[in-house]
């Protein structure tokens, strides 16, 4: 019977495999943000929007933040189960094209909250002063922006109970 002693040779090989997609890296290109419109200025066919982002919190997150801020007593719920947290007031700049979808709340709009679609030019008149339809409540209630990187896709007024 013959047996052999062989030698083992270890080879390390580095292989670079290209990523299948980089779409999962970094922040999402489309984001939804809550906050307040501070100004709109005409630029070409659209506008430059200055926006004060904030957080619209609900549930235990809202109750805890409000208690920590002294807005409610510890253990007490916030009114209407939401709390607006706006600490920084740093304005962000977005492009608002004339083609963006805008909805505000009016007495005669659609659905239970009176959603009314308006053109971007009318939103500019609301923000800057000018003739526009009567809102159910002022834009100071806040708005939701859906943005693609730096460009507003949609803007919806937030109802404040």
Image (tube, rainbow, N blue to C red):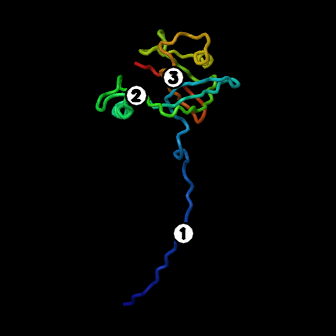
Answer with left or right where residue 127 lies relative to residue 62.
right
Q: Residue at x 52, y 25 (%)?
A: 36
The spot of residue 34 in percent (x, y) is 49, 29
Answer with left or right where residue 135 lies relative to residue 58.
right
The spot of residue 128 in percent (x, y) is 61, 17
Q: Mark number for residue 140?
A: none
Give neighbour class at mark 3: few <14, some 14-19, many 20+ (Cα, 10 Å).
Answer: many
Q: Quadrant of the N terminus?
A: bottom left
Please, what secondary structure does the residue beneath circle 2 have? Answer: strand
Name the residue tied to disc 2. 83
**Total tally of numbered discs in the picture:** 3
Q: Mark number for residue 156?
A: 3
CA distance for labels 2 and 1: 56 Å
Please, what secondary structure does the residue beneath circle 3 have? Answer: strand
| Pair 2/1: label in front | 2
> In the current view of this chain or complex, which residue is farthest to the right?
44
Q: Residue at x 60, y 24 (%)?
A: 39
Whichever of callouts 2 and 1 sits on the residue coming sooner in the sequence is: 1
Whichever of callouts 2 and 3 sits on the residue coming sooner in the sequence is: 2
CA distance for labels 2 and 3: 18 Å
Q: Quadrant of the C terminus?
A: top left
CA distance for labels 1 and 3: 55 Å
Q: Is residue 11 above or below residue 98?
A: below
> In the current view of this chain or complex, which residue is farthest to the left?
75
The spot of residue 27 in percent (x, y) is 53, 42
| Pair 2/3: label in front | 2
Name the residue tied to disc 1. 13
Give neighbour class at mark 2: few <14, some 14-19, many 20+ (Cα, 10 Å).
Answer: many
């Amino acid at each position: 019977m013959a047996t052999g002693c062989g030698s083992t040779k270890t080879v390390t090989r580095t292989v670079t495999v290209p990523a299948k997609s980089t779409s999962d890296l970094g922040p999402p290109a489309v984001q939804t943000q809550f906050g307040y419109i501070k100004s709109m200025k005409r630029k070409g066919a659209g506008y430059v929007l200055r926006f004060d982002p904030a957080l619209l919190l609900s549930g235990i997150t809202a109750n805890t933040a409000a208690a920590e801020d002294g807005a409610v007593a510890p253990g007490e719920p916030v009114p209407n189960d939401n709390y607006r947290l706006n600490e920084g007031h740093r304005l962000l700049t977005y492009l608002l094209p004339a083609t963006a979808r805008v909805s505000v709340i009016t007495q005669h709009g659609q659905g239970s909250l009176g959603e009314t679609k308006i053109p971007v030019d009318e939103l500019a008149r609301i923000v800057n002063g000018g003739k526009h339809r009567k809102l159910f409540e002022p834009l100071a209630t806040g708005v939701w922006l859906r943005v693609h990187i730096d460009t507003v896709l949609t803007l919806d007024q937030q109802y404040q109970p």
